Amino acid sequence: MASSSGKSASNAKTSAKATTTKSQPAKAAATAEATADANLFDLGGIDAATLLDWYATMQLGRRLDEKAANYLKMAKGWSYHAPFAGHDGIQLALGKAFRAKKDYLFPYYRDMLTCLAAGLTVEEIIANGLSKDADVAGGGRHMSNHFAKIEFNIQNVSSCTGNHCQQAAGLARAVKKYGGDEVVYCSTGDSTTSEGYYYESVNGADREKLPLIFVIQNNKYGISVPLHEQTTNLVVSDNFRGFTNLKIWNVDGRDPVACHSALLEARAYALSGAGPAMIHADCDRIGSHSNSDNHELYREKEDIDAMKHRDPLPRFRASLLAAGIATEEQLAAIEQANKQAIFAAADVIEPSPDPAPSSYTDFVIPESIVAYHDEAESRWQTDPDAQQITFREGINTALIQEFRRNPNTFLFGQDVASHKKQGIFNVCKGLLDEFGNDRVFNAPIAEDYIVGTANGMCRYRDDIRVVVEGAEFADYFWPAMEQLVECSHDYWRTRGQFSANMVVRLASGGYIQGGLYHSQNLEGTFTTLPGIRVVMPAFADDAVGLMRNAMRSRGVTMYLEPKFLYNYRPTSTSMPSDDFIIPFGKARVRRPGTDLTIVSWGTAVHWSLQAAQRMEAQGTSVEVIDLRSLAPWDKDMVLESVKRTGRCVVAHEDKKTAGFGGEVASTITEEVFRWLDAPVVRVGSKDTPVGFAKSLEGAILLSVDDIVQAATATVNF
């Protein structure tokens, strides 16, 4: 029985006993016993053909679950397996309610039956479990038991428990903005609801009235942690009762009919535009959490035995027999056919090829719209007679131009769409006025939600481009790292089937007397993540050219904006022509020289140029290279320069320890060591937090004096 009043559906008191023998007399006896003592499911309202189809799918799923465990015992694969037994009712109903190639489904790692019912074949399930090249989720790149079929809109989700709820909200937002009639299903376990980002997702979906259905499969355990140690409300949907537009159904997750009825009602509600829905399904986790867990270490035998008596599969079987829907012979025939289907699929998949070892380099990041080539620097030039723009104006102009160029472009973040304000640094000025609140809008102060929903919006159509202010200041981006990591391997994990096409803008760095939380540089962290681009322009024309490439290209680009440079006069350049685009991974020589190379980026480029002028007065010719792009970075230009000068200083605003300069210096030492006349020197800000007092900030952050001192020591080595 389903309930939308807030009270849990009553659990069955007794259940059919699962048969363990293969003989027909014994099976018949077990069925008779089950019929006599079980609390049978009410099958009313569902036609016989549908019920038999449901039983076939449910029984097939359970046999596949057993097959997975056998593969583990035989050391053939399925190295991670999370059995679904006890979740059968809600998973079967969820998979059947999902409309393949129309709706969107975000399953979680226990959703084998959900995905089978939603359209995955037995072969596709086994190929995933054995991590074969034929795995439609991603060719064995993701952990086994993480089922997906993007062709059907069954999404490939991470192992980070429940982080797909953010993406589901973003996808539902896109559905609403484009006037679609699809719904998005987000399936999780009960413990996921303890995560802060789950609350953020419900809050956002409720506020935006999104066509999103949250499905909570509550088996009362998070691995070994019982539910009462997770939350006060053991019916965890009660934690969300305060959301005005969210409608909640509580249902017996063992009962496929009750679950299906609730899901259809929830879908109608979500499609009405009234708000999101939540299905709370009371389930049992009959087995251990996974193959690496032994639930007998923390659960009482009586509890385990009681769950087995509530097992949905024998109860459903007994219900079909008791209602006269099927005979014993009909069900036995279904079961035999399922057995043969699994054998046949295994015969096909087991000898099929594993992923080629060399293929790991494929699909790390999508190709950019403009790639680097030898003519790149001469092909796109600024017009010296054109209008002069500041660094801030360059970013703003590029955003406006790209929004005009692609109507499927969106911008959101904190303070970007407030009337008259439109961004705390005025970078977004004018976008709300020209493009309206439908395309430019504010987000909750929840950085993970901002990035996660941007990822989700990109899933609706491939020409969508999302620009977000990941945080008002880079220092506040850390909560969003969870979703950024997810974005970094989406393309690789799906073997090129999905990329999050987004630009994450961050006001970065110091020199504005911002103190501890308004002065950080995060590029050293971002560049450790394969699968994302990281750029940091230092001049207005480069700000335009890199933004154009970022917004037109597929994939994720971290666009770091040194906020000190927004209105810093030396950054001003002429407005570049319409075809001016900076290739990723292409540096620029800002000043030629013969005695020493300084490699830099961001604000430090300007300090390096000042340092080079001072060194010239001392008789030293310094070449200054502005990387502009850190991931990828222009190794060829840097190495060629160092070969000529024999000396190198890497200067950056970030802390010296673990700054990206260490990567540059290491590469130079590894590849052109024999050309060096002195050690490669790194110079950066001090390895301390940034103080608020101007005197402290000046002592801590990189200065021109620091660069001159390092350069002088290198030349005199």
Image (cartoon, grey):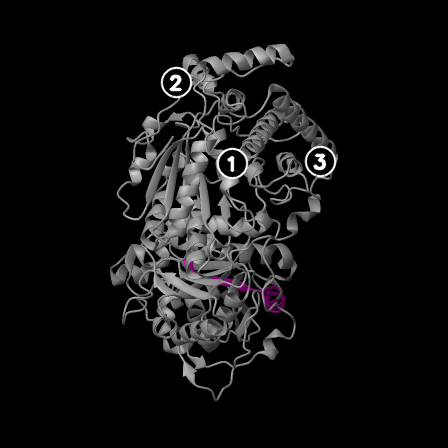
- Of tags 2 and 3, the one toward the viewer is 2
Q: Which residue is mark 2?
A: 13
Q: Which residue is mark 1?
A: 109
- Between 493 and 683, the one lying in front of the other is 493
Local crowd size for mark 1, using a 10 Å CA cut-off: few (<14), some (14–19), many (≥20): many
Q: Position of residue 338 (x, y in %)?
A: 65, 28
Q: Which mark is residue 308?
A: none
- At horizontal 48% and vertical 38% (from top left) the residue drawn is 94
Q: Secondary structure at mark 3?
A: helix
**Quarter in which the N terminus is drawn:** top left
Q: Which residue is mark 3?
A: 349
Q: Position of residue 473 (x, y in %)?
A: 34, 59
Question: Is 489 a magenta residue?
Answer: no
Labels 2 and 3: the sequence-earlier one: 2
Residue at the limit of the structure toward the front, as seen here = 324
Q: Amino acid at mark 1?
A: Tyr
Q: Amino acid at mark 3?
A: Ile
**From this viewpoint, is residue 655 visible?**
no
Look at the image and give the residue range highlighted in magenta: 637-655
Q: Secondary structure at mark 2?
A: loop
How far is disc 1 from disc 2 in space, using C-alphas? Answer: 29 Å
Labels 1 and 2: the sequence-earlier one: 2
How far is disc 3 from disc 1 in space, using C-alphas? Answer: 21 Å
Labels 3 and 1: the sequence-earlier one: 1
- At horizontal 51% and vertical 24% (from top left) the residue drawn is 316
